[in-house]
Image (tube, coloured by chain):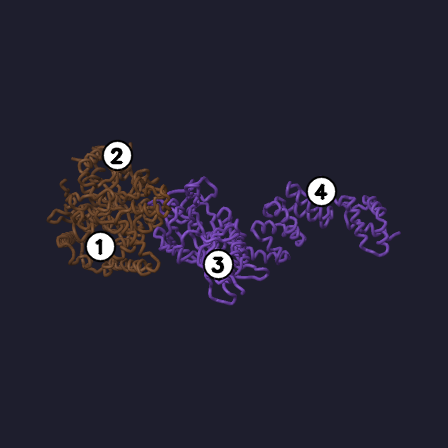
């Protein structure tokens, strides 16, 4: 068997029996990447060696939680001395002088952090990984289609067995939607569960780092390592981290599941609808009770999100000005250009189309005279959306929805129509606005052979509930075992 | 036409925390450029701010000392503008919920007390420093992220002198609180002024100018005085005042309009999402209130009451906390409070002034200081004049007064026998004065006393000499 096809928990089992070493896995991984990545393009800057810490092959599973397991990192998470560019020209050559907190945690758990990073939409702006300065990643199930985004590289790498485990980041669905499109498991933790220190910010009040894995158990394993309070992140929450693998009981008898009617609507793809409805039936057969509920402010989620997220992004991206690091427009000083001209040219040349669009939108929303009408109002509606969820979670353990209204679309299909691209996140955005945790896991395939994702939501800091439900569903089905033919 | 100036001041002070406002970097002044930086204060991608709790405590302390109401719910906001010394191109500041607001500071204008209202005091981070060379500009980010407290007055100040008094009183309070060294030269206190003028009696405000680049309290005073005159002159000539930022040029002693194009400022403030709002508990505020020492105004009143000092003397002695402690130690132990105060404010302040140091920095122990006063005023071992010389010598060498008097042979001569010879010489050399005295001109006696003093090198006890002369001239 090619070892790159293993899940992390399978690898740890074999490592324990001394059947394999981390070096063996990485060798197979390198072979697979060499063969497959020219087609999928999940990684960027592959010329770098993948990287293996010298002592990784001597590790046993008892040594650390993730002994010797290679982990693929999205290009917006800082790794000390290794290029971290958010797939943007403006950060060309940027090597952070420090590790993100999640990277520190991974390293101290014995994981091998790969030097080559996963492709993404520039600054996580997008739902297709087409907005990368390195070009698009392709969906391993159909190379003509997008892998979703913005963590499309991480999800495609997992689907194509070009990775064992991966980290993504999720601001409005950027872990879950690509996980759904690629038929893998993606978890967006509660806001504050995982430190954001070292995650290059898109929208600070919405961003979370989370795992993208081959199955639910790996998701729990990775959550065990990356979760927890960080004194470097004032928005991280000081709550104890449970052992998430203990939630994988394969028992959801009596679990109360809510189905929000606003998420099952006429406009959605009929195949997606029937596949998700079948999944609901499966959960019922496993002992869960399911009932329709309402989340009445759902329709405002997309506009509210695009005001808050772009406002924060316009501020977070102000620092990319060519002064200290990254790209600087050439010949500005030589031609006696002013400092302002240097800023303008650097940002004009360094940012891609979508980044510019969002900076403009966000700058406008925060401008004098518009702040109250847009940003402040959006904050108020955000509170209403949060209260919708609070009300449902007073009576239910989980909420089930489709992850995306459609399966993976064609490359180029929505690239010229930002609004229809924004609407592909319609089912994932509310979760970030409310700060709650959610997972996407495979729940079937369309006739054309494209994966469909099931989204499970729970109240803040109840990742255990979604892992429990997801694991029980996964054990009762075999979708996660299917592999694309490449 | 009589005009009135309307002035508001914005004072920025560096809070003297050991580390910066949002990271662990040192705040020490004068280090190698860019040696006290980290990903956070460099604004590197992915880094996040964490509030320095001491900075917040200091800010609360200043707010309380200025009679502000300290807000129980406070938050930070981002203020956006592009400049190379601002690494994130936004400054973490406070917009609508400052740490404290609605306070006041009482000053004296001549002998009239006046209350200057404080609008708000908020915390923010400092920017870096640009160093301009011939063909390039360089950025030093050691200062970036140092906690600043911005204290904004209402437009209650009506003259350059009032502004000066306000700054002096504010500096004094902040030094008492020991939360900043308030050194304008090091940039740890900076002051901008908004100034407009209007006809006396008018209530509508005139168009204001914003003054920057003043590097001392005197600079603020001079710039305001110049600006008041400039605006008056302009109005008298029928010109319109334009709203603009003007820079003080200390060499030219004039303000000049800033050359860069004034664009409408839109800082696009919004709540800093990386820092959740802070709830400051009431008992925390009270605990900080308890740490506030007796402030200069209260101390001056107490000095007047306990030591019988004049308002003027008390005001001088409490100007800094160290001076006040130094003075109080001596006042408390001294027998004659008034003479202790006189020696502190007179000769001791003189020594401090000529050496450009504070009174509190003069190394004369309380015991030595009081002994000298005793030697001069009670024991009359030396004259008042010689006493001042001894004091200067004590300050320079640290030696006790008795030793200096002995070494320099300065002891006053009160022994009549030792003065006999000089007195007889003075009488025989000044027959006219002797005759004048005897014919009833009392003033002549003082001249003769002076002659004896001269002959003894100033060491004779003038009272003894006077008595001796009287007896001698009246007995014959």
Q: Is residue A339 above or below residue B70?
A: above
| Number of residues whose C-alpha sits closer than 10 Å to that of mark 3, classed few (under 14), some (14–19) or many (20 or more) | many
> Which residue bears the numbered disc 3?
B195
CA neighbours of label 1 inside 10 A, class few (<14), some (14 to 19), many (20+): few
Q: Chain of mark 4?
A: B
> x, y (%) of residue B404?
69, 41
Task: Measure the alpha-carbon separation of dots 2 and 4.
Answer: 85 Å
Q: Which mark is residue A419?
A: 1
Chain identifier, colour purple: B
The one nearer the camera, B377 or A122, is A122
The hue in which chain A appears in the rendered picture of the protein? brown
Residue toward you, B53 or A205: A205
Closer to the eye: label 3 or 4: 3
Instruction: Give the alpha-carbon distance from disc 3 to disc 2, as whole Å.
Output: 64 Å
Q: Is residue B157 visible?
A: no
Q: Are marks 2 and 1 in contact (CB under 8 Å)?
A: no
Q: Are marks 2 and 4 in contact (CB under 8 Å)?
A: no
Q: Which residue is mark 2?
A: A49
């Amino acid at each position: 068997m090619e070892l790159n096809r293993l899940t992390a928990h399978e690898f740890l089992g074999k490592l324990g029996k001394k059947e394999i070493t981390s070096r063996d896995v990485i060798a197979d991984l390198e072979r697979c990447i060499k063969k497959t990545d020219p087609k999928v393009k999940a990684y960027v800057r592959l010329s770098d060696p993948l990287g293996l810490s010298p002592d990784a092959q001597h590790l046993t599973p008892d040594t650390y939680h993730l002994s010797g397991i290679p982990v693929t990192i999205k290009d917006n998470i800082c790794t000390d001395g290794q290029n971290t560019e958010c797939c943007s020209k403006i950060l060309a050559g940027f090597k952070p002088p420090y590790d993100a907190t999640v990277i520190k945690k991974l390293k101290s758990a014995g994981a091998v952090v790969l030097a080559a990073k996963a492709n993404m939409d520039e600054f996580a702006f997008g739902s297709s990984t087409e907005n990368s300065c390195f070009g698009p990643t392709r969906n391993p199930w159909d190379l003509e289609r997008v892998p979703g985004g913005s963590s499309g590289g991480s999800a495609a790498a997992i689907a194509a067995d070009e990775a064992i485990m991966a980290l993504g980041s999720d601001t409005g669905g950027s872990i879950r939607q690509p996980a759904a499109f690629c038929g893998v498991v993606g978890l967006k933790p509660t806001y504050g569960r995982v430190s954001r220190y070292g995650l290059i910010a898109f929208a600070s009040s919405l961003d979370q780092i989370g795992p993208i894995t081959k199955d639910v158990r790996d998701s729990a394993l990775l959550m065990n390592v990356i979760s927890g309070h960080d004194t470097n992140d004032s928005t991280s929450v000081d709550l104890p981290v449970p052992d998430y693998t203990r939630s994988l009981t394969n028992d959801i008898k009596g679990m109360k599941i809510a189905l929000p009617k606003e998420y099952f609507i006429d406009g959605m793809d009929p195949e997606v609808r029937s596949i998700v409805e079948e999944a609901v039936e499966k959960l019922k057969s496993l002992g869960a009770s399911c009932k329709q509920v309402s989340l009445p402010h759902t329709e405002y989620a997309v506009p509210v999100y695009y005001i808050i997220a772009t406002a924060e992004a316009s501020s977070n991206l102000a620092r990319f000005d060519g002064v200290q690091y990254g790209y600087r427009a050439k010949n500005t000083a030589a031609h006696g250009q002013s400092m302002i001209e240097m800023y303008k040219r650097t940002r004009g040349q360094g940012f891609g189309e979508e980044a510019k669009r969002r900076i403009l939108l966000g700058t406008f929303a925060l401008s004098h005279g518009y702040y109250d009408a847009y940003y402040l109002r959006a904050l108020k509606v955000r509170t209403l959306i949060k209260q919708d969820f609070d009300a449902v979670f007073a009576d239910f353990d989980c909420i089930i929805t489709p992850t995306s209204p459609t399966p993976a679309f064609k490359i180029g299909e929505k690239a010229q129509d930002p609004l229809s691209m924004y609407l592909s996140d319609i089912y994932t955005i509310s979760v970030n606005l409310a700060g709650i945790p959610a997972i996407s896991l495979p729940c079937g395939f369309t006739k054309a052979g494209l994966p469909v994702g099931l989204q499970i939501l729970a109240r803040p800091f109840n990742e255990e509930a979604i892992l429990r439900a997801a694991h029980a569903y996964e054990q009762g089905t075999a979708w996660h075992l299917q592999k694309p033919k490449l | 036409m009589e005009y009135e100036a309307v002035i508001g001041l914005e004072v920025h002070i560096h809070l003297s925390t050991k580390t910066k406002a949002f990271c662990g970097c040192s705040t020490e002044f004068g280090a190698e450029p860019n040696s006290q930086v980290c990903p956070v204060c460099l604004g590197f991608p992915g880094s996040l701010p964490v509030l320095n709790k001491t900075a917040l405590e200091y800010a609360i302390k200043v707010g309380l000392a200025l009679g502000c109401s300290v807000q129980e719910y406070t938050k930070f906001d981002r203020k956006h503008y592009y400049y190379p010394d601002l690494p994130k191109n936004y400054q973490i500041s406070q917009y609508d919920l400052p740490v404290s607001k609605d306070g006041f500071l009482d000053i004296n204008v001549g002998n009239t007390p006046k209350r200057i209202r404080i609008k708000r005091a908020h915390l923010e981070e400092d920017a870096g420093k640009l160093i301009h060379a011939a063909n390039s500009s360089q950025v030093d980010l050691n200062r970036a992220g140092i906690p600043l407290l911005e204290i904004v007055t209402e437009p209650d100040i009506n003259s350059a002198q009032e502004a000066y008094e306000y700054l002096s009183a504010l500096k004094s309070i902040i030094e008492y609180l020991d939360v900043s060294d308030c050194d304008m030269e090091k940039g740890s206190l900076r002051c901008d002024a908004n100034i407009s003028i209007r006809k006396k009696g008018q209530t509508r405000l005139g168009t204001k100018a914003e003054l920057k680049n003043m590097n001392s309290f005197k600079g603020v005073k001079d710039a305001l005085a110049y600006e008041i005159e400039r605006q008056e002159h302009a109005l008298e000539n029928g010109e319109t005042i334009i709203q603009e930022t003007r820079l003080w040029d200390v060499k030219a002693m004039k303000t000049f309009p800033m050359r860069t194009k004034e664009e409408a400022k839109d800082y696009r403030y919004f709540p800093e999402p990386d820092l959740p709002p802070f709830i400051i508990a009431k008992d925390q505020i009270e605990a900080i209130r308890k740490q506030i020492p007796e402030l200069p105004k209260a101390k001056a009143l107490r000095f007047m009451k306990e030591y019988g000092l004049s308002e003027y003397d008390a005001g001088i002695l409490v100007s800094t906390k160290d001076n006040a402690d130094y003075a109080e130690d001596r006042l408390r132990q001294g027998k004659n409070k008034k003479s202790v105060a006189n020696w502190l404010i007179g000769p001791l302040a003189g020594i401090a002034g000529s050496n450009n140091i504070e009174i509190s920095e003069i190394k004369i122990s309380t015991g030595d200081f009081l002994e000298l006063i005793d030697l001069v005023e009670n024991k009359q071992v030396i004259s008042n004049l010689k006493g001042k010389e001894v004091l200067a010598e004590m300050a320079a060498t640290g030696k006790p007064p008795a030793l200096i008097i002995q070494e320099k042979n300065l002891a006053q001569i009160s022994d009549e026998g030792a003065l006999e010879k000089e007195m007889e010489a003075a009488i025989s050399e000044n027959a006219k004065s002797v005759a004048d005295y005897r014919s009833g001109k009392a003033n002549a006696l003082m001249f003769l006393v002076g002659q004896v003093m001269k002959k003894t090198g100033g060491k004779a006890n003038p009272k003894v000499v006077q008595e001796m002369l009287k007896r001698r001239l009246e007995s014959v």
